[in-house]
Image: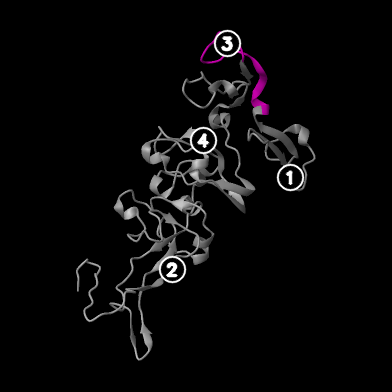
Amino acid sequence: MSADGLTLSVVGAGVPAAEDCDSATPGIGCTVTGFEGDGSFRLSEQGCPCWWDTNDLSCACCTEGGCGCGGPDVEGTAVDETAVKDTCVPCSKWWRCDPQPIAEIVQSRTVYLCDKNKDGANCVGGADEQPLVVEAEYLDYTESHNGCPSWADSSVDGACCRKGGCQCGIDALRYITPNLCVPCDEPERCQSENVVATWKIGEWNHCSQPCQGEVNGEAIIGTQARIVTCSDQFGNVLADSACEAETRIDYYAGSDDQSQFPTKDRADYEAFWKGGAKPITEQQCNLHACGDYTCKKTATQELV
């Protein structure tokens, strides 16, 4: 098949080979060669009237059974509809006018964390979308990240897909955008192809001691603990190493209300989800000296 997908070379032979191939007798197994596609249906690249403007003779001349491609250029679209007016295809196979390229294996790709679709804006692969180069062999179904309307919302600019590829939908707070194409029979890859791994942090539990003291020369110091786990923006638990290697930031964790913040404890963690070194899970607490009367604040801010 040719690179543009329009011409298919056909070769066949009968076993055993027929002896009277010149007779063109139906059913005999003669060797055949030929082409299916543009090469068989076009007489010339131009010279015939375009169907949308019969005074324009710059369109292809087609054989019987062939139809010319193209149409009037539609203003406001990213595609030049007249670009294929020099092409003829079988009238029954009009989709060949716009053949999809085949998915190809690449050795690296760039992924983005873009949330702009939540405001109706387009993701354009800018530096503010936290680009990350992934070095791994990958079967790429995305012909271009922009240039085709989103299948979920035609007002949003999306990716143009290769054959067998389908655009992802829009879930901006989890960084799913229509700027990625995945195999149509594997839509779950819209989630797995672009994961941001971040630490999920629980609140500190109550301190084990109300104050710091000493008994028979042995120090009594309170401790408290919290749960810290690694997961992606969909809540899937990941190995700690995934978060330790993460360089990007998740500003939402799937929500744009107060629940998006990782923890009320801002002393050692910012108000967004991130990776890097694992936050501590245990610390000393209530380090003031014990006296005859000691009070402390509980999680409900009550003095006891």
Q: Which residue is mark 4?
A: 146
Local secondary structure at mark 2: loop
Image quarter of the N terminus = top right
Task: Provide the residue designation for mark 1.
Answer: 14
Q: For mark 2, what is the residue?
A: 280
Which region shows up in magenta?
39-58
Q: Residues within 10 Å of mark 4 (few under 14, many from 20)?
A: many
Q: What residue do we see at 42% from left, 66% from top?
A: 229
Q: Are marks 2 and 4 in contact (CB under 8 Å)?
A: no
Q: Earlier in the sequence, mark 3 or mark 1?
A: 1
Neighbour tally class for label 1: few under 14, some 14-19, many 20 plus, Cα within 10 Å: few
Compared to 189, does 230 lie above or below?
below
**152, 8: nearer the viewer:** 152
12 or 259, nearer to the observer = 259
Residue 100 appears in the picture as rendered: yes
Select label 4 or label 1 by which is in front.
4
Q: Quadrant of the C terminus?
A: bottom left
Three-letter amino acid code of the residue under disc 1 = Gly
Mark 2 or mark 4, which is nearer to you?
A: 2
Counting from the top left corner in percent of width and height, residue 171 is at 39, 46
Q: Earlier in the sequence, mark 3 or mark 2?
A: 3
Q: Residue at x 38, y 69 (%)?
A: 227
Q: Amino acid at mark 3?
A: Asp
**Whole-number angstrom distance, CA of label 2 to CA of label 4:** 42 Å
Secondary element type, mark 3: loop
Q: What's the mark number on residue 113?
A: none
